[in-house]
Structures are given as C-alpha cells and as structure tokens.
Image: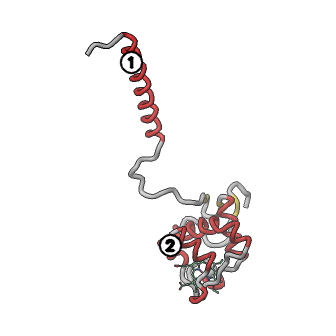
Amino acid sequence: MRRLPMSRMLMSMLSIAALSSAALLASRAQDAPPATAAASPPPYTVQDGNKVDPATLEGWKTWRALACERCHGAEQEGLVGPSLVNSLKVLSKEDFHTTIMNGRPDKGMPPWGGVPMMQKNWEGLYDYLKGRSDGAIQPGHLYPIGAAQ
Ligand code: HEC
C-alpha cells in the first residue's frame, strides 16, 4: 500500500508515542511490588514491639478507655469474650466494624456505635488488634514512634 509522506510522518509519530507510553508502563511495573507478594502490608507500623503509628496508638487508647479487657482479657487472650488474638486472624475488617458498632447483644458483646471515641478510632483499633494478632505488637503500654521511653 502506498502512503503519502504526510501520513507516514503521522504513523511514525504515533509509534513513537506508543513506544514511550509502553516504556512508561514498564517503568511503573518495576516500581510496583511483585504480583506474587504473599500478603498485603500490615495496617499498622510498629518498632521494637511497643512503638506504633498515631492511628494504632489511638486504637490502643480506645481499647483501654472502653475497657474491652474486662471481657477479652488484658492481652486479648479471651475471658468471657473470645480471644481477639485468634479472632483477628479470621475476622474481616468489615465484620469487625459491624460487630463493634452493633455488638452482639444476644451473645454478651455490647454495641459501641454510639461512642464518639469508637466512631473516630475504630480503624486504629482494628490495626492495633491486628498487630496483636500477628504477634508484631506486644501486650501492654504503647508509645508513639520516635518517643523517648
Ligand atoms: C461485657 C463483655 C464484653 C465487652 C466489654 C466487650 N466484649 Fe467483645 N465480645 C464479647 C462476647 C461475649 C463476644 C462473643 C459474641 C459471640 O459469641 O458472637 C464478643 C465478640 C467480640 C468480637 C468478635 C469476635 C469474633 O470472633 O467474632 C470482637 C471483634 C470484639 N468482641 C471486640 C470488642 C472490643 C474492641 C471491645 C471494647 C470496645 C469489646 N469487644 C468489649 C463480650 C464483650
């Protein structure tokens, strides 16, 4: 097929554009973690087992303020309520949210949806309990990352 010079020029411009966007995609792909990465990164950041990011710290404070340990144990190991170290291995974040907000009053778990501190910090609380469940966060007092102890 014969092409006019003008259309040939257009074609080569197009192919340059296609090549450079392919190169861009390739370099982006290199930045991304490998598709085979085992699990998504944890929702918390922890150093030395007891220094955590601000959201996780607020989650821990909420745990303390609302005295969840009365029923779930000071180390989340379970008392009249189940061990949350075990629960958080299987409970989805969505189910966690529903359980915390609505409770399971028929089974002895109170609802916390009306508590402003919980409304504000439930995600940090999830992060904290996830860290406990993973064994990455120690039981007991937590500190902000960067704080002198
Ligand atoms: C008065 C006792 C009591 C208190 C206080 C309490 N819980 Fe519970 N919680 C329970 C019981 C009992 C269950 C188990 C309900 C069931 O059998 O489904 C439960 C279940 C849960 C579950 C679901 C576990 C699972 O495996 O499905 C989560 C998460 C949870 N509690 C978190 C909390 C948090 C966070 C607090 C503090 C804000 C808290 N609980 C305070 C008694 C309590």
Q: In front: 13, or 30?
A: 13
Disc 2 marks a residue whose amino acid type is Leu
- Tag 1, which secondary structure? helix
Which quadrant contains ligand 1? bottom right
Q: Residues within 10 Å of mark 1 (few under 14, many from 20)?
A: few
Ligand 1 has an atom within 8 Å of the beta carbon of the residue at disc 2? yes
Between 36 and 50, the residue placed more toward the observer is: 36
Mark 1 beta carbon near ligand 1 (under 8 Å)? no
- In percent of width and height, residue 36 lies at 38, 52
User: On screen, 143 above or below 28?
Assistant: below
In the rendered image, residue 147, in percent from the top left (x then y), is placed at: 73, 57
Relative to residue 88, is residue 111 drawn left or right?
right
Q: Are marks 1 and 2 in contact (CB under 8 Å)?
A: no
Number of the label disc, if any, that sits on residue 139: none
Q: Under tag 2, what secondary structure?
A: loop
Type of the residue with mark 1: Ser
What is the residue that sits farthest to the top in this orientation?
Answer: 5
Q: Which mark is residue 91?
A: 2
Among the two numbered marks 1 and 2 on one chain, the one whose residue lies closer to the N terminus: 1
Compared with 15, 8 (above or below) is above
Q: Residue 138 occupies which quadrant of the picture?
A: bottom right
Q: CA distance from mark 1 to mark 2?
A: 55 Å
- Mark 2 burial class by Cα count in 10 Å: few <14, some 14-19, many 20+: some
Q: Is residue 4 left or right of residue 91?
A: left
* Location of mark 1 (residue): 12
Quarter of the image for the C terminus: give it.
Answer: bottom right
Q: Nearer the viewer, mark 1 or mark 2?
A: 1
Q: Quadrant of residue 129?
A: bottom right
